[in-house]
Amino acid sequence: MLTFQLNYALIYGVMRDKTEYVHFLNATFKVEKNPAYTGNHYLARVNSVLGNTYPLGTTEQEMIDKYHNSVVLEKDIDGNKVLAGDIHRVVEVTKCFEDRSPKGRFHKDNY
C-alpha cells in the first residue's frame, strides 16, 4: 500500500496540466496583533489572513517566514517600511491546499 501511495504521488505530480494552469499552495493564517505595533493599519484589526500563495513544496515554516517578511507599506507616515510581521504574528496555518490558476491570469509570481 505504501508503495502505491508513493507511486501515485509521483505520477500525479507528473500528470498535472502545466500547459494551461499554474499550480501553487494557497494558505490561510490565524494571526494576532504584535504587542509592539502601535500604528493603526487596518491589518492590525484582523484575526485571519487568507489568499497567501506560495510555490509547491514550500514548508509551513517557510510560508510563515515569507509572510512575516512581506512588505505591507513601502513608507509609512515616518518614512519607514512596514512588514506584515511588524503588525502581527502568525499563530497557526489554519488552511493550506494546492490551487491553480490559468496561465496569464495569475498576477503574482509564476510558480
Image (spheres, rainbow, N blue to C red):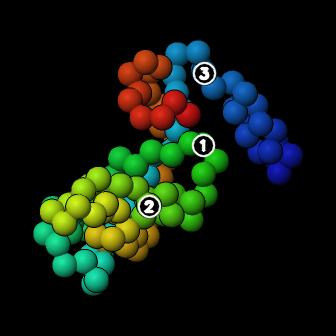
Direction from residue 102 to residue 51 in the image, left or right = left
Q: Quadrant of residue 67?
A: bottom left
> Which tag, 2 or 3, sits closer to the chain's start?
3
Direction from residue 9 to residue 37 in the image, left or right = left
54 or 101: nearer the viewer = 54
Q: How crowded is mark 3: few (under 14 residues within 10 Å), some or many (20 or more)?
A: few
Residue that label 2 marks: 69
Image vertical order of residue 70 relative to residue 61, above or below: above
At 27% from the left and 84% from the top, the residue drawn is: 35
Q: Residues within 10 Å of mark 1 (few under 14, many from 20)?
A: some
Disc 2 versus disc 1: distance between alpha carbons?
19 Å
Q: Position of residue 48 (x, y in %)?
A: 29, 63
Q: What element carries label 3?
A: loop
Q: If the image is split into quadrants, where does the C terminus sit?
A: top right
At 35% from the left and 62% from the top, the residue drawn is: 83
Q: Position of residue 93 (x, y in %)?
A: 45, 64
21 or 109: nearer the viewer = 109
Residue that label 3 marks: 18
Image vertical order of residue 89 relative to residue 79, above or below: below
Residue that label 1 marks: 56
Q: Which residue lies furthest to the top in this view?
A: 19
> Which tag, 2 or 1, sits closer to the chain's start?
1
At 37% from the left and 73% from the top, the residue drawn is: 89
Q: Where is residue 96 in the image (x, y as percent from the top left)?
A: 48, 53
Image vertical order of residue 75 relative to residue 16, above or below: below
Q: Where is residue 99 in the image (x, y as percent from the top left)?
A: 47, 37
Direction from residue 111 to residue 76 in the image, left or right = left
86 or 90: nearer the viewer = 86
Q: Is mark 2 on a helix, strand or loop?
A: loop
Name the mark nearer the viewer: 2 or 3: 2
Disc 3 versus disc 1: distance between alpha carbons?
13 Å
